[in-house]
Amino acid sequence: MKVAVVGATGLVGTKMLQVLAERNFPVDELIPVASERSVGKTVEFKGKSFAVVGFADAIAARPDVAIFSAGGSTSLELAPQFAAAGITVIDNSSAWRMDPTKKLVVPEINAHTLTPEDKIIANPNCSTIQMVVVLNPLHKRYGIRRVVVSTYQSVTGTGKKAVDQLMGERRKAVAGSEESYPMAYAYPIDLNVIPQIDVFLDNGYTKEEMKMTNETKKIMGDDSIRVTATTVRIPVMGGHSESVNIEFEHDFDLAEVREILSGAPGVVVVDDPARQQYPMPKDAHDKDDTFVGRIRRDESQPNTLNLWIVSDNLRKGAATNAVQIAEYLAANGLL
C-alpha cells in the first residue's frame, strides 16, 4: 500500500511514522510530505531513509491514504485536493472535526460508520479521544447525562517549541544554564500550571474546552450528553490526564463498572488504592492504551461516578488513533 504522511517532520508526524512501523501497517511505498522548507530532508522509517517531498509531488504520486498532521490551515487547503485525486485523507487537525459532512472517528466507537465515500476523515482532539474510549462502554450500559472533566495536559500537546521551553526552564533552574529557549506559552511552564489551552471564546471557555464538549457528542452520536470542561497545561511529558465526573441515568455497581472497563477495547484498568496503584503519565508514555483508575462513587449525588484517565497524547491521542483508522479502512476494503 502507498502511504503518505503529511507533516512527516513534525512531532506528531514523526510519531506517526513510528506507529506505522511498530504496528506493521502494510506500507509498500512511503511518501513523507512537508512544507517547502523541509523538502529534501530525510526521515527514517524501518531502518531506511526517505526524502521529504512537497504537496504537489505527493498528490501526483497517488497514495492510497494520506495521514495529515500539518495544521488546520494546511488541511483546509490541501485535504480537498488529495481527496479530489481519489486519495483517502485521515486528518489530525481540528479543520474538519465539526464539519457535518465529515466523520469524526475513534475506531473503538464508530469506525463501522465509514464508507468508501468518506475521503476526508477527521481524527478527534487528543483529550477527547482518551475520554470517550472510557465513556462509551459506560454510556451503553447506564446512559450518561452529564460529564464534568478537568484535564492535566502534557506540553507535548503544544509541540516541540513547548518541550524546548520546559526543558530550557528546567536547565536554567537546576544547572544555572544561560542558554536561550523559545517561549511557547505566555508564562513559564516549569513548576507551574497554565489554566488555558488554545484561545478564549466569547463564552469564557477555551477552544480546547469546547472541542471536548462538541466532539464528545459527535463521536458518541448523542447530543443529549452534557459536557463541561476545564483544560490545563502542566509540566509533564508522558501524556494527558483527566479527572472525570460522570452522572448516569441509572445507578451502577462499582464491580460491574470495573468489569465493563476491563473488557473495553483499548482500555486498561489500573485501580488498586491499597497498593497506591493508579494511572500516571510516565506509565502511559509510548503506549497505545488508555488507562483508567481512581474509580469511585461520587457521594455528593446519586448515580454519579468519579474516575481518572491517562493516555499518551501523541499516540492514542493522535498518531495511533489515525493509524487505527487506516487499519480499519484497509481491513475492510475501504482504501
Image (cartoon, rainbow, N blue to C red):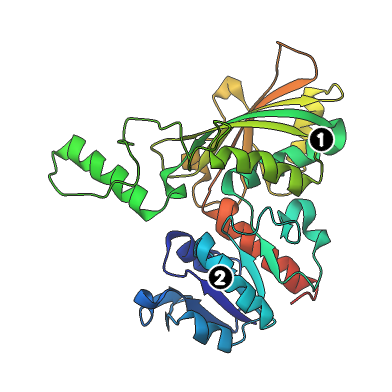
Image quadrant occupied by the N terminus:
bottom right
Q: Kindly identify the residue that appears in the image at 67 percent across and 38 percent down.
A: 213
Q: Nearer the viewer, residue 15 or 200?
A: 200
Left of 56 or right of it: where is 237? left
Q: Compared with residue 36, is residue 126 higher up or lower down, i.e. above or below?
A: above
Q: Kindly identify the residue that appears in the image at 55 percent across and 42 percent down.
A: 207
Crowdedness near tag 2: few (<14), some (14–19) or many (≥20) residues, C-alpha within 10 Å? few
SS label for mark 1: loop
Q: Of the residues tagged 2 and 1, which is closer to the observer?
A: 2
Q: Position of residue 30 (x, y in %)?
A: 54, 81
Q: Compared with residue 98, is residue 298 higher up or lower down, i.e. above or below?
A: above
Residue 61 lies in what quarter of the image?
bottom right
SS label for mark 2: helix
Image quadrant occupied by the C terminus:
bottom right
Circle 2: residue type: Glu
- Disc assigned to residue 224: 1
Crowdedness near tag 1: few (<14), some (14–19) or many (≥20) residues, C-alpha within 10 Å? few
